[in-house]
Amino acid sequence: MTQESKNFYRRTSALVIPMAIQNLINVGISSIDVIMLGKIGEKVLSGASLGAQVQFIMGLLLFGVTSGASVLMAQYWGKRDMRSIETIFALAIKTAFVTGVIFTLAAFIAPQVLMSLFTNDSEVRANGALYLRIVCLSYIPNSLVMVYLNSMRSMEKVVIGSITYLSSLITNTVVNLLLIFGYFGLPKLGIMGAAIGTVAARFVEFIIVIIYDKKFNDVFTFHFEYLKIKSKELTSDFLKISSPVIANELMWGVGLSTMTAILGHLGSATTAANSVAQVCRNLATVVAFGVANSAAVMIGKVIGEGNKERAKEYGKRFIKLTIITGIAGSIVILCVRPVVLSVLTLSDDARKLLSVMLLIMAYYVIAQAYNTTLIVGVFRGGGDTRFGFFLDVTFMWGISIVLGFIAAFILELPAIIVAFILYFDEIIKIPFSTWRYKSYKWLNDVTRK
């Protein structure tokens, strides 16, 4: 192995490991709710899981904003142009704040309306609305923290994310234990306790980020003056790069939520099984998503430095890494499957559905890891933010969701067949994402001199 290769893998590890830990902690936060509420009952678990879809959609919208911003920030980081980075960060933070306000108001004012989109079960809907009314208070701090930490990633500052999310996990676990089950004389609040735990965790994240920014960040410190910076050129670049990413993440996120809604209308047993399967899938892809995010940062940086040949070489290496991590994720699902089936309190129907859904997820995560590293990592790092949108519109919406809807509500096929159809889109994307990679049309310098 050459010295250059050793440097690559050393730098990649320095990014991937903290990012994987962050992803694992975030999965842990959602897993805690699933495990604890699963002990109370199927309807409560389903209500919280479907209620969390609102924050999931908001998170994906924000991820689109920060991913688009990070494409520019990573390339400007390669040029060490901090003024441009400050301008782009200000645009992202203002967008995040407005987004958080909109979602907070929607969830607080009309939780029943939002829940009716995901389920026709009145008891599940009532539980989800109760959850939303409380958890929506976390949306604004969560939006600002997400933009800040993802912006730090683009400048290779990733450890703070691990510290922040670990603190959040501890807070969420402790508050959940105290309030869901009513330990130490505290009221037993059930699903309300889970919502309060999430709100407490998000505010802890917010406080830690403020302290880090003011006391410890030696590369970038936020000032309110940044919000006054105006640049028509960079605003135009931000909109040009971010808009396809936002559209892509929305199509993908709303697509996943639509899949959840289709399965949610097939009964609470299907909803509960799908909720647990999604958590297991998220657990299995924590490293793969870390590889994807690292690819965006490193490829964007070397393109900003003017070294496109190195960017091509990095792309090849990241593909090898993501195949390995995808297979490892599949093995994780197969290993946790018997444990999950024995621990959770589920009906017989839900348990049978979950058993097969986990087998579906075992092949799904390999394809998802591969496509995500190419689309979110390699392509976006190279400034190509449109191709992923095309793939999701064509294959997720045009094929999987349409056929899944027909299978569920017209042909009235069994739930497990519907799930198989819905989660097949990542497989059929592979030839097209591979073709795009080999064309090198993704390799672009999107900065200004």
Image (spheres, rainbow, N blue to C red):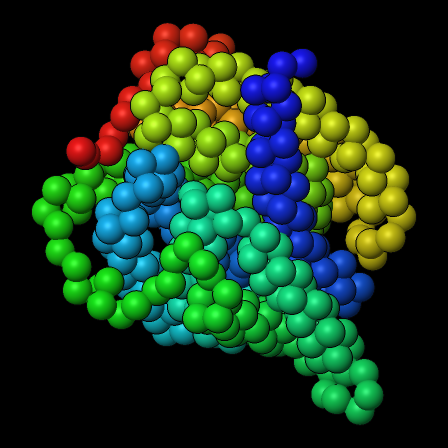
Compared to residue 338, the image places residue 368 above or below, namely: above
Q: Residue at x 63, y 23 (%)?
A: 6
Compared to residue 420, the image places residue 74 above or below, namely: below
Residue 295 seen anywhere in this rendered image of the structure: yes
Side (left or right) of 87 relative to 397: left
Closer to the camera in the image, 412 or 290:
290
Closer to the camera in the image, 249 or 237:
237
Closer to the camera in the image, 73 or 354:
73
Q: Position of residue 445 (x, y in %)?
A: 27, 26
Q: Residue at x 43, y 8 (%)?
A: 438
Q: Split into 4 quadrants, where in the image is the C terminus?
A: top left
Residue at the extreme left: 232
Q: Residue at x 49, y 14 (%)?
A: 313
Q: Position of residue 145 (x, y in %)?
A: 45, 62
Q: Position of residue 238 (x, y in %)?
A: 23, 43
Residue at the extreme bottom: 185
Side (left or right) of 416 relative to 259: right
Q: Residue at x 48, y 70 (%)?
A: 215
Closer to the camera in the image, 137 or 435:
435
Residue 418 seen anywhere in this rendered image of the structure: no
Question: Picture quarter containing residue 274?
Answer: top right
Compared to residue 387, the image places residue 176 above or below, namely: below
